[in-house]
Structures are given as C-alpha cells and as structure tokens.
Image (cartoon, rainbow, N blue to C red):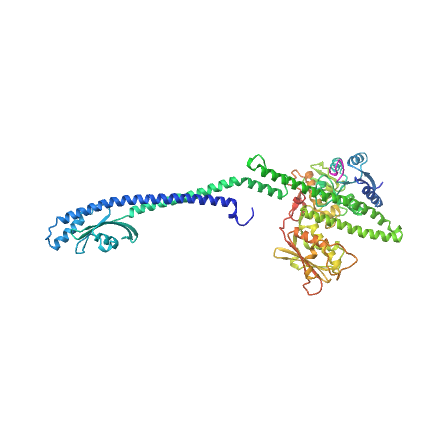
C-alpha cells in the first residue's frame, strides 16, 4: 500500500485538482472537506501525511492541526495564503512540520512529502550508533530519544532536527544547513521553520526551555547541541 | 515630540509669560519701594543734618561775634580755627569756615565745595546741596553740604556730611529687593510651567495615545472620565480611532480576501495544468502547444498576482521585514543559480569576500531576481553582479550590455507599470508589465536603502543598477524573528 495523504481543503475544485495531481505523483489521497470530517477520518484511519488548509469553515486549520498533533506525530503540512503573515508561525506552533503557500505546484508538495518521510539520518552513513549527550540518549535507528531513561515524544521533524544537531555535538549548524538537511530546502528556505522547531524541541528536551542547556543558540550563526 | 523650535511650544510660552508677568510685578514693587525708602531715608538724614549744621553755624556766629573787632590777624585766625573745631561734633561731618580774606579753616579745602553752593551762599543765604564726588578712598560718594553765609563777618560756614553709610544701606536694600524680584520671577516661571503642564496634561495624553495608534495599537482609547471639559475632544478622538481602525481592518481584510479569491482559482489551475503536463506526450501536438502557452501565462499571471498583492500590502503599510544576517556572496550565488542565468559573473574584492548584511532574505532575493529579469527583458541579459562595502553601506550592482537607460527615464522606470518609452532593445515577445522595478524600489526603500540606474562605469553600452543598503547591525534576529 502506498503512502496515504489526507488532504483537508474546503474548496471543492482545488481539492479535486490537488487530489488528481497528487495521485498522478503516485500517492494515495484521502479527501476531507472540513475539519470535522478530517478529524473523523484521521481517528478511524490515520494517514501517513496530512495537508491542511488554514482557512477552513468551522474548526479552523490550526485547531485541526493541534488535535491531530495531540494524538499523533504524523507529518503535517499547512497551506497558507501568504508567507509573510503570522499564520505561518501560528501554524508551525500548532504543530505543523512545514508549510506551503497557495498556489503551490503539486510537484513541490511531493518533494516536501518525500523530504518528510525520509528517515532521520546520521551524517556518517552506516553510523547509527546511539548518541549520548548529557542526560539525553538518542538512537537514530530506533527513532528514540531517552532523557534520564524516559522516552521523549518528538515528532519526526523534531527528531530529525535533534539527530542532525547531535551528529556533531558542539558544532554550529546554520539555518540554511538545517533547512537543507532536515526539510530538504535549498538556500531560500524559511528560517522560521528552524526557529519554531528549535523552540518546540526545547520544550521537550530542556529542563528550562527559556535557558536551554542542550539546544543552544549561537548568535548570528545558528544552533548547536551543547555536549 | 517634534524636533526644532521648542520655544514655540505652548508649555514654553506659558512658562515664559508667567515669568515675565512675575518679573514685571516684582520690578514695579522693587522700583516703588526702593524709591520711597530712599527718599524717606535721605530726607530724614538731611533734615537732621541740616538742623545740626545750622545750629553749628549759629554757634560759630556767636563765637565770631565775641571776637573783638580790633584783634589782629593772627588772633583772628586762631579764633576762627577754634570756632570751627568747636563745631566738630556731629557724626562724620566736616565743617569749613571761610574767612572774609578767603582763607579756609578746617580740614576741608574751599575748592572742594561745589561752585553752585558757594555762589548761593555768597549771596547770604542758607543753602543745601547734594552732590557726588570722589572720596578719600577714590570711590564716588554722595555728600550732603549745607552752607550758611555769615554776612556780618564776611565769612561763610559750610558743613559737609558723607552719605556712604546710608548709601550702602540703600544698596543692600536694593540687592535684597532685586534678589526677591529674581526669586519671584523664577517662582512665576515655575508656577507657569506647573500650570501649563497641568493644562497640557490632556494634550500629552492624547499625543501619547496618537503615538500608540500610529505604532499600530488600535486598541488605544482616551479615558472619558478624566476631565469633563475635554470629554468632547476625547470622544471625537476615540471616534476617529474607531473609524480609522475599522477602515484599516477593512482594507486588510479586503487585501486578504482578494488574495484568497485570486489564489484559489490559481491553485486549481496550477494543479490541473500539472496533470496535463505530466501526460503531455500523449496529447496531440496542437494540444501540447496550448499546454505550453497555458504554462507560460499561468506563471506570468501568478507573478503578477503576487506582485500586485505585495504592492498593495506595502501601500497598506502591512509589510513586516523578516530580518536575518547572512553572507552576501553565498546569497548572490544562490540567487544567480536560481535565476538560471549562468552567464552572470559575480565579482567582489578579496576584502569583501565575507561581507554580511542584515536584510529580509526573501525580499532581497526578489530585488536581485527582478533586476536580473529586467536585464533579460530589456538589456540582453545581466552580465555582472558585484558587491562591496562603502563606509557603512553595502552596494550591490547589476550590469547588462543592453542599450542602457536614457537619462530622462532613470527615475520613471521605477514607477509602477512604467516602460521605457523607446522600444530600443526591448524584446517584444515578453511585454511584461513594469511592476518588477517598482517592487525593487519599494523593497529597497523598506530596507532604508536606495536604488538607482546609471551608465556602465567602463564606458561600454549598458545599464548599471545600483542598490545601496545600510549594513545593519550584525546581530542575528535569532528566534525573535519568528515570534
């Protein structure tokens, strides 16, 4: 069975066209015309990737995103009207892993989905050893992060971000590099993706997210994992 | 508060008026009280001196009358001297007796008596006189003199008193009065400042509220309870803010609605066209040509919609830059790569290799891309991009080898929907609307920078677009930029 995508979009023509184009790309697509339908569909039969339009009647896209995120670490892509609004940050904070602005090319969406489904990798091929940093223990192979022996629940993107930083503890990774390695973006990716995910990651791995011990900002350069 | 002529401000003017008022009042008080006191004291001093002097003169006359008429000159002189000595008893006054022969008796010389007084006394009168003269300590001092003509003996009696003590008392008084006047003026200024501040407090509140609103806080309202006198002003102010807020909200909602309305069909078109493109080989040739045409104009339409929305957001003042600090070299390499223009050389000096700039990366990329696109359309393709730091600004240039831009068009080309009027060098196939350069100008302006076009510096034909940006602080926007 192929990878299944749940598309939440209220405009019927867009839904049809996007579904058609995604199916052409080889994905299995489930459609939902509003938030309620989407949540029902996801709870009975979870998809592998969720695509949510922010502007939905009834339950809005942010709420759908939060509800799904509470139950699952499935990759979520938000569709916004504009890139330069607060919507993007709000969507990412609601739990989305990435976003696209309308109109997007379904080819681009496919590329994003493929980037998301790619496994977290260690930068050294074949080196899937556990990485221990302070109280954290990261196993890229199993997709597990333990803190003091207890499992932390990270989304796939958060996990990839952590593994990327942990591949060379102490080394500063620029936003561009992280965008490329974690999200598969070129140079012009949106740095806010990194910033919001770092913030989300901190709430899970840090004792005090306001003064991080592990995921540290390196002013003007990027982020690093403090060994 | 606007810079410049603060002294024209209401606060300064009210303070000044109060100060001047207090100064005038206290000046009047000073002048009248000083003048009255001075007159009173002088009159008292002089009248007591005069009665003393006159009685002295009478005593001298009595002594002179006791003098035998036939006594010789030597005896007379001695007696005259004794008569003067005998009268020396009032505080600090100096007597002088002038004998008929013109001889002076006493410590004073006859020459020291003012001529006017002597003239009067010579005519057998009692005369008094006040005058100013250098005293022994070389200071100007006021003297009071009384002269009595002793006509029986052909002599003149004078007595002089210095008024230095009285003067110094009066001077002290004047100083105290002036100090009090100055204090009163200052107090007046203080009172003026205080009451003006009190009176202007509502204005300050309104101006604070207006500033908050200008900064985008449309929830700011004036409290109607504070001052009933100002309730009308507060009400209309609040009404204005309501209307303004509603209007801006309406404009923003309109822009966002239009944006949504335009993007939805574009989304359907884009996705559907992609399906067609995937299957293009199975289409008849004429349908393939139609699909290509659709693709070209759909791309153009998308860009036009994006540009229009961007411009309208700028007009609404709704654009917020997402600043970050990045290396210009790497950035430009990526822009050039993305623009599929491998012919463009990127030139920079060794010194500028690691030049960093703080800017909105996406918008700056659009600026450079639009300049490259413009060069492709009108200048036969961009040939060279350079960057360097000059002082505290960063300069980026984009050059082409086209016909250049005539001097008369050099500002106009940055206007919306403008085109170079002469067709020279313009590729007719793509008559793209001229939003690109106006967006370049708007983006650069948002970055507090400048953009202009000149001839190429090397003398060859072609246009040279120059963007100048402030370098910005090299602080990374960090996560704050996301919040």
- Of the pair A54 and A201, the residue shown nearer to us: A54
Place of residue B406 in the rendered image (x, y in percent of width and height, measured from the top left): 70, 62
Q: Nearer the viewer, residue B139 or B465?
A: B139
Quadrant of the rendered image containing residue B341: bottom right
Q: Nearer the viewer, residue A101 or B290?
A: B290
Seen in the picture, residue A8 relative to B431 is either above or below; the reply is above
The answer to whether one can see residue A197 in this image is no
**Position in image of residue B272 (x %, y %):** 83, 46
**Majority secondary structure in the magenta region:** loop
Is residue B178 in sight in this rendering? yes
Residue A70 vs residue B55: left or right? right
Q: Nearer the viewer, residue B308 or B448?
A: B308
Residue sitting at x 69%, y 39%: A205
- Up/down of B419 relative to B89, above or below: below
Outermost residue to the bottom: B459
- Is residue B333 positioned above or below A49 on the image? below
Please state if B139 lies on the left or on the right of A35 as rendered.
Answer: left
Q: Which residues are magenta?
A: A55-62
- What number of labels is visible? 0
Residue at image x 53%, y 41%?
B200
Q: Is residue A59 magenta?
A: yes
Residue B164 placed where, x, y %? Answer: 29, 48
Quarter of image, res A53: top right
Quadrant including the C terminus of chain B: top right
Is B221 contained in the magenta span? no
Give percent across and percent down for residue A8. 79, 39
């Amino acid at each position: 069975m192929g990878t299944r995508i749940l598309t939440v979009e209220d405009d019927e023509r867009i839904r049809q066209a996007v579904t058609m184009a995604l199916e052409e790309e080889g994905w299995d697509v489930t459609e939902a015309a509003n938030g309620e339908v989407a949540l029902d569909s996801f709870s009975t039969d979870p998809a592998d990737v969720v695509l949510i339009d922010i502007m939905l009647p009834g339950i809005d896209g942010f709420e759908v995103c939060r509800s799904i995120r509470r139950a699952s670490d499935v990759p979520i892509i938000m569709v916004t009207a504009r890139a330069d609004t607060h919507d993007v940050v709000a969507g990412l904070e609601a739990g989305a892993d990435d976003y696209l602005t309308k109109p997007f090319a379904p080819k681009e969406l496919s590329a994003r989905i493929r980037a998301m489904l790619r496994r977290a990798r260690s930068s050294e091929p074949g080196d899937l050893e556990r990485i221990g940093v302070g109280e954290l223990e990261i196993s890229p192979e199993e997709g597990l992060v333990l803190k003091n022996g207890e499992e932390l629940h990270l989304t796939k993107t958060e996990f990839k971000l952590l593994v990327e930083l942990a591949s060379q503890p102490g080394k500063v990774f620029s936003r561009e590099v992280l965008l490329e390695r974690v999200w598969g973006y070129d140079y012009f990716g949106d740095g806010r993706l990194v910033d919001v995910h770092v913030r989300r990651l901190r709430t899970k791995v840090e004792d005090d997210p306001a003064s991080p011990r592990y995921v540290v900002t390196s002013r003007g350069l990027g982020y690093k994992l403090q060994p | 508060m606007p810079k410049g002529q603060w002294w024209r401000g209401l606060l300064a003017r009210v303070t000044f008026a109060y100060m001047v008022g207090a100064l005038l009042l206290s000046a009047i008080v000073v002048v009248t009280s000083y003048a009255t006191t001075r007159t009173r004291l002088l009159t008292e001093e002089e009248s007591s001196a005069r009665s003393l002097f006159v009685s002295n003169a009478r005593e001298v006359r009595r002594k002179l009358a006791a003098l035998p008429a036939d006594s010789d000159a030597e005896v007379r002189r001695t007696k005259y001297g004794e008569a003067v000595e005998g009268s020396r008893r009032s505080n600090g006054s100096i007597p002088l007796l002038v004998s008929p022969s013109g001889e002076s008796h006493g410590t004073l010389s006859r020459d020291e008596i003012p001529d006017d007084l002597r003239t009067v006394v010579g005519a057998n009168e009692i005369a008094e006189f006040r005058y100013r003269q250098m005293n022994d300590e070389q200071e100007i001092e006021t003297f009071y003199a009384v002269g009595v003509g002793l006509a029986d003996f052909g002599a003149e009696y004078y007595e002089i008193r210095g008024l230095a003590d009285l003067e110094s008392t009066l001077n002290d008084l004047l100083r105290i009065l002036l100090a009090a006047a100055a204090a009163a003026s200052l107090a007046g200024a203080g009172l003026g400042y205080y009451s003006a501040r009190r009176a202007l407090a509502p204005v300050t509140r309104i101006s604070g509220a207006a500033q908050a609103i200008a900064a985008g806080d449309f929830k700011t309202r004036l409290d109607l309870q504070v001052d009933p006198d100002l309730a009308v002003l507060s009400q209309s102010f609040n009404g204005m803010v309501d209307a303004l807020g509603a209007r801006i909200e309406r404009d923003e909602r309109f822009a966002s609605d239009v944006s949504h309305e335009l993007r939805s069909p574009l989304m359907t078109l884009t996705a559907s066209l992609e399906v067609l493109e995937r299957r293009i080989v199975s289409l008849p040739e004429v349908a393939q040509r139609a699909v290509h045409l659709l693709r070209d104009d759909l791309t153009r339409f998308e860009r036009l919609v994006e540009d229009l929305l961007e411009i309208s957001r700028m007009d609404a003042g709704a654009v917020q830059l997402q600043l970050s600090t990045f290396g210009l070299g790497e950035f430009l390499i990526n822009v050039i790569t993305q623009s599929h223009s491998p012919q463009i050389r990127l030139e920079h000096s060794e010194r500028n290799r690691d030049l960093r700039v703080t800017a909105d990366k996406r918008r700056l990329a659009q600026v450079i891309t639009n300049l490259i696109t413009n060069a492709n359309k009108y200048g036969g393709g961009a040939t060279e991009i350079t960057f360097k730091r000059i002082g505290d600004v960063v300069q980026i240039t984009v050059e082409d080898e086209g016909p250049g831009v005539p001097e008369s068009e050099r500002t106009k080309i940055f206007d919306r929907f403008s085109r170079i009027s002469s067709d020279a060098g313009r590729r007719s196939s793509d008559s793209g609307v001229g939003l690109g350069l106006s967006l370049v100008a708007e983006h650069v302006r948002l970055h507090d920078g400048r953009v202009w076009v000149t001839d190429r510096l090397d003398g060859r034909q072609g246009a040279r677009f120059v963007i100048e940006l402030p370098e910005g602080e090299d602080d990374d926007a960090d996560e704050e930029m996301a919040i």
